Image: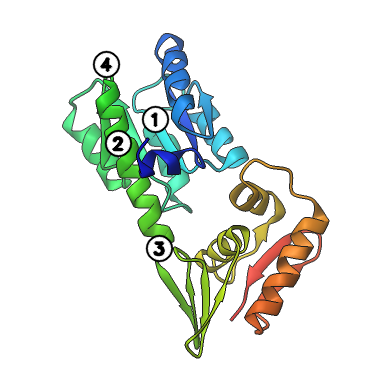
Amino acid sequence: MEAWQESLKNLTLLYVEDEEGIRRPMVDTLSYYLKEVYEAEDGEAGLECYYTHRPDIIFTDLKMPHRDGLWMVREIRKHDKHTPIAMITAHSDKEYLLSAVELKMEKYLIKPIALEELLHVLRLCIEDIEEERGIVLECGSVRFDLKNRLFIKEERETPLTQKESDFLALLLRKKGQLIPYEEIESQVWRGEFMSTDALRTLVKNLRKKLGIPCIKNHSLAGYSFEG
Protein backbone atom coordinates (compact mmCIF):
# COMPACT_ATOMS: atom_id res chain seq x y z
CA MET A 1 0.00 0.00 0.00
CA GLU A 2 1.36 3.42 -0.96
CA ALA A 3 2.01 6.16 1.61
CA TRP A 4 -0.98 8.26 0.50
CA GLN A 5 -3.25 5.25 0.91
CA GLU A 6 -1.92 4.78 4.45
CA SER A 7 -2.87 8.41 5.13
CA LEU A 8 -6.44 7.69 4.01
CA LYS A 9 -6.80 5.20 6.87
CA ASN A 10 -6.84 8.14 9.29
CA LEU A 11 -9.46 10.14 7.39
CA THR A 12 -13.25 10.19 7.11
CA LEU A 13 -15.43 10.82 4.06
CA LEU A 14 -19.04 11.85 3.47
CA TYR A 15 -20.68 10.29 0.39
CA VAL A 16 -23.93 11.92 -0.79
CA GLU A 17 -25.96 10.11 -3.46
CA ASP A 18 -29.72 9.65 -3.84
CA GLU A 19 -29.62 6.30 -5.67
CA GLU A 20 -29.14 3.58 -3.07
CA GLY A 21 -28.06 1.07 -5.72
CA ILE A 22 -25.07 3.31 -6.48
CA ARG A 23 -24.47 4.61 -2.96
CA ARG A 24 -24.24 1.35 -1.05
CA PRO A 25 -21.59 -0.38 -3.25
CA MET A 26 -19.55 2.83 -3.36
CA VAL A 27 -19.67 3.21 0.43
CA ASP A 28 -18.47 -0.39 0.76
CA THR A 29 -15.58 0.30 -1.62
CA LEU A 30 -14.59 3.55 0.07
CA SER A 31 -14.76 1.93 3.52
CA TYR A 32 -11.86 -0.30 2.51
CA TYR A 33 -9.60 2.74 2.12
CA LEU A 34 -10.83 5.18 4.79
CA LYS A 35 -11.23 5.22 8.56
CA GLU A 36 -14.96 5.79 8.24
CA VAL A 37 -17.46 6.64 5.49
CA TYR A 38 -20.71 8.46 6.25
CA GLU A 39 -23.58 8.40 3.76
CA ALA A 40 -26.56 10.60 2.97
CA GLU A 41 -29.34 10.43 0.37
CA ASP A 42 -29.65 14.13 -0.51
CA GLY A 43 -28.15 17.55 0.12
CA GLU A 44 -30.16 18.29 3.25
CA ALA A 45 -29.23 15.00 4.91
CA GLY A 46 -25.67 15.50 3.69
CA LEU A 47 -25.43 18.93 5.32
CA GLU A 48 -26.74 17.55 8.61
CA CYS A 49 -24.20 14.72 8.41
CA TYR A 50 -21.42 17.23 7.68
CA TYR A 51 -22.23 19.27 10.80
CA THR A 52 -22.45 16.12 12.92
CA HIS A 53 -19.24 14.40 11.78
CA ARG A 54 -17.07 17.07 10.09
CA PRO A 55 -15.61 14.67 7.49
CA ASP A 56 -12.16 15.25 6.00
CA ILE A 57 -13.40 14.68 2.42
CA ILE A 58 -16.80 15.00 0.72
CA PHE A 59 -18.00 13.23 -2.43
CA THR A 60 -21.41 14.37 -3.64
CA ASP A 61 -23.72 13.82 -6.55
CA LEU A 62 -24.79 17.12 -8.08
CA LYS A 63 -28.36 16.54 -9.21
CA MET A 64 -30.62 15.04 -6.55
CA PRO A 65 -34.28 15.51 -5.56
CA HIS A 66 -35.25 17.81 -2.70
CA ARG A 67 -31.89 19.52 -1.96
CA ASP A 68 -29.15 18.91 -4.51
CA GLY A 69 -25.39 18.72 -4.11
CA LEU A 70 -24.75 22.31 -5.17
CA TRP A 71 -27.11 23.62 -2.49
CA MET A 72 -25.31 21.58 0.16
CA VAL A 73 -21.85 22.72 -0.96
CA ARG A 74 -22.93 26.38 -1.04
CA GLU A 75 -23.99 26.05 2.60
CA ILE A 76 -20.73 24.34 3.56
CA ARG A 77 -18.54 26.83 1.70
CA LYS A 78 -20.06 29.74 3.62
CA HIS A 79 -17.71 28.87 6.48
CA ASP A 80 -15.51 26.01 5.26
CA LYS A 81 -13.24 26.85 2.33
CA HIS A 82 -10.77 24.01 2.84
CA THR A 83 -12.46 20.59 2.99
CA PRO A 84 -11.84 18.84 -0.36
CA ILE A 85 -15.13 18.23 -2.18
CA ALA A 86 -15.44 16.13 -5.34
CA MET A 87 -18.55 16.20 -7.51
CA ILE A 88 -20.07 13.04 -8.94
CA THR A 89 -22.14 13.51 -12.05
CA ALA A 90 -23.44 11.95 -15.22
CA HIS A 91 -24.17 15.40 -16.60
CA SER A 92 -22.25 17.60 -19.00
CA ASP A 93 -24.31 20.74 -18.40
CA LYS A 94 -21.70 23.51 -18.57
CA GLU A 95 -23.54 25.92 -16.28
CA TYR A 96 -23.91 23.23 -13.63
CA LEU A 97 -20.23 22.36 -13.80
CA LEU A 98 -19.16 26.02 -13.78
CA SER A 99 -21.20 26.57 -10.62
CA ALA A 100 -19.38 23.63 -9.06
CA VAL A 101 -15.96 25.04 -9.95
CA GLU A 102 -16.89 28.41 -8.42
CA LEU A 103 -17.57 26.54 -5.17
CA LYS A 104 -14.04 25.09 -5.25
CA MET A 105 -15.20 21.69 -6.49
CA GLU A 106 -12.55 21.25 -9.16
CA LYS A 107 -12.39 17.47 -8.74
CA TYR A 108 -15.06 15.36 -10.39
CA LEU A 109 -16.04 11.77 -11.09
CA ILE A 110 -18.21 10.74 -14.02
CA LYS A 111 -20.71 7.90 -13.57
CA PRO A 112 -20.17 4.99 -13.78
CA ILE A 113 -17.12 5.46 -11.55
CA ALA A 114 -14.06 3.34 -12.31
CA LEU A 115 -11.86 2.29 -9.37
CA GLU A 116 -8.80 3.84 -10.99
CA GLU A 117 -10.53 7.22 -11.24
CA LEU A 118 -11.86 6.93 -7.69
CA LEU A 119 -8.35 6.36 -6.32
CA HIS A 120 -6.97 9.20 -8.44
CA VAL A 121 -9.44 11.69 -6.96
CA LEU A 122 -8.83 10.38 -3.43
CA ARG A 123 -5.12 10.96 -3.95
CA LEU A 124 -5.78 14.55 -5.10
CA CYS A 125 -7.85 15.11 -1.97
CA ILE A 126 -5.02 13.77 0.21
CA GLU A 127 -2.58 16.15 -1.48
CA ASP A 128 -4.93 19.08 -0.76
CA ILE A 129 -5.25 18.08 2.89
CA GLU A 130 -1.51 17.63 3.37
CA GLU A 131 -0.78 20.94 1.67
CA GLU A 132 -3.32 22.71 3.88
CA ARG A 133 -1.98 21.12 7.06
CA GLY A 134 1.59 21.84 6.00
CA ILE A 135 1.15 25.60 6.07
CA VAL A 136 3.32 27.41 8.62
CA LEU A 137 0.97 29.69 10.53
CA GLU A 138 2.37 32.82 12.16
CA CYS A 139 1.03 34.69 15.17
CA GLY A 140 3.09 37.65 16.28
CA SER A 141 6.63 36.48 16.97
CA VAL A 142 5.78 32.77 17.01
CA ARG A 143 5.15 30.21 14.28
CA PHE A 144 3.32 26.92 14.10
CA ASP A 145 4.59 24.30 11.64
CA LEU A 146 1.51 22.07 11.51
CA LYS A 147 2.93 19.57 9.03
CA ASN A 148 5.91 18.78 11.26
CA ARG A 149 3.97 19.50 14.46
CA LEU A 150 6.33 22.16 15.80
CA PHE A 151 5.89 25.35 17.82
CA ILE A 152 8.69 27.77 16.94
CA LYS A 153 9.66 30.72 19.15
CA GLU A 154 12.95 32.61 18.85
CA GLU A 155 14.21 29.79 16.61
CA ARG A 156 13.61 27.25 19.36
CA GLU A 157 11.43 24.35 18.25
CA THR A 158 9.02 22.60 20.60
CA PRO A 159 7.36 19.39 19.35
CA LEU A 160 3.58 19.08 19.52
CA THR A 161 1.46 15.95 19.72
CA GLN A 162 -0.99 15.16 16.91
CA LYS A 163 -3.96 16.34 18.97
CA GLU A 164 -2.14 19.51 20.05
CA SER A 165 -1.31 20.28 16.42
CA ASP A 166 -4.87 19.57 15.23
CA PHE A 167 -6.32 21.69 18.04
CA LEU A 168 -4.03 24.62 17.23
CA ALA A 169 -4.78 24.35 13.52
CA LEU A 170 -8.50 24.50 14.25
CA LEU A 171 -8.15 27.54 16.52
CA LEU A 172 -5.77 29.42 14.23
CA ARG A 173 -7.83 28.95 11.09
CA LYS A 174 -10.75 30.52 12.93
CA LYS A 175 -8.70 32.99 14.96
CA GLY A 176 -10.83 35.06 17.30
CA GLN A 177 -13.88 32.84 16.78
CA LEU A 178 -15.42 30.57 19.39
CA ILE A 179 -14.88 26.90 18.54
CA PRO A 180 -17.59 24.84 20.29
CA TYR A 181 -16.78 21.62 22.13
CA GLU A 182 -18.65 19.57 19.53
CA GLU A 183 -16.41 20.82 16.73
CA ILE A 184 -13.26 20.24 18.78
CA GLU A 185 -14.33 16.65 19.44
CA SER A 186 -15.08 16.11 15.75
CA GLN A 187 -11.93 17.74 14.35
CA VAL A 188 -9.36 16.80 17.01
CA TRP A 189 -10.64 13.53 18.50
CA ARG A 190 -11.94 12.46 15.07
CA GLY A 191 -14.89 10.32 16.07
CA GLU A 192 -13.48 9.20 19.42
CA PHE A 193 -15.09 10.23 22.69
CA MET A 194 -13.62 13.45 24.13
CA SER A 195 -13.90 13.72 27.90
CA THR A 196 -13.82 17.08 29.66
CA ASP A 197 -10.69 16.04 31.55
CA ALA A 198 -8.92 15.01 28.34
CA LEU A 199 -9.62 18.38 26.73
CA ARG A 200 -8.52 20.28 29.84
CA THR A 201 -5.29 18.29 29.95
CA LEU A 202 -4.65 18.99 26.27
CA VAL A 203 -5.16 22.74 26.77
CA LYS A 204 -3.06 22.78 29.96
CA ASN A 205 -0.13 21.07 28.22
CA LEU A 206 -0.41 23.36 25.20
CA ARG A 207 -0.47 26.52 27.30
CA LYS A 208 2.64 25.30 29.10
CA LYS A 209 4.45 24.64 25.82
CA LEU A 210 3.42 27.92 24.19
CA GLY A 211 4.12 30.17 27.15
CA ILE A 212 1.81 32.86 25.75
CA PRO A 213 -1.78 33.63 26.87
CA CYS A 214 -3.49 32.91 23.57
CA ILE A 215 -5.94 30.07 24.23
CA LYS A 216 -9.10 31.44 25.80
CA ASN A 217 -11.74 29.29 27.49
CA HIS A 218 -15.40 30.21 27.08
CA SER A 219 -17.19 28.55 29.99
CA LEU A 220 -19.55 25.74 28.92
CA ALA A 221 -19.10 26.76 25.26
CA GLY A 222 -15.63 26.11 23.86
CA TYR A 223 -12.28 27.76 23.11
CA SER A 224 -10.84 30.50 20.92
CA PHE A 225 -7.39 31.73 19.92
CA GLU A 226 -6.74 35.33 20.92
CA GLY A 227 -3.44 36.93 20.00
Image quadrant in which the N terminus is located: top left
Asked if 162 appears above or below 35 in the picture, the reply is below
Sequence-first tag of 2 and 1: 1
Secondary structure under tag 1 reads: strand
Q: Is residue 163 left or right of residue 76?
A: right
The one nearer the camera, 100 or 57, is 57
Mark 4 or 3, which is nearer the eye?
Answer: 3
- Residue 103, image x, y percentages: 33, 46
Which is in the foreground here, disc 1 or disc 3? 3
Q: Tell whether 151 sits left or right of 83.
A: right
Colouring used for the render:
rainbow
Gap between marks 4 and 3, in whole Å?
A: 34 Å
Q: Which residue is mark 4?
A: 112
Q: Is residue 155 above or below residue 215?
A: below
Check whether the beta carbons of the residues at disc 1 and disc 4 lie within 8 A of each other: no
Quick one: SS at disc 2? helix
Q: Which residue is mark 3?
A: 134
Q: Amino acid at mark 4?
A: Pro
Q: Which residue is mark 2?
A: 121
Q: CA distance from mark 1 to mark 3?
A: 26 Å
Measured in 3D between alpha carbons, the distance from the residue under mark 2 to the one under mark 1, in whole angstroms, is 13 Å
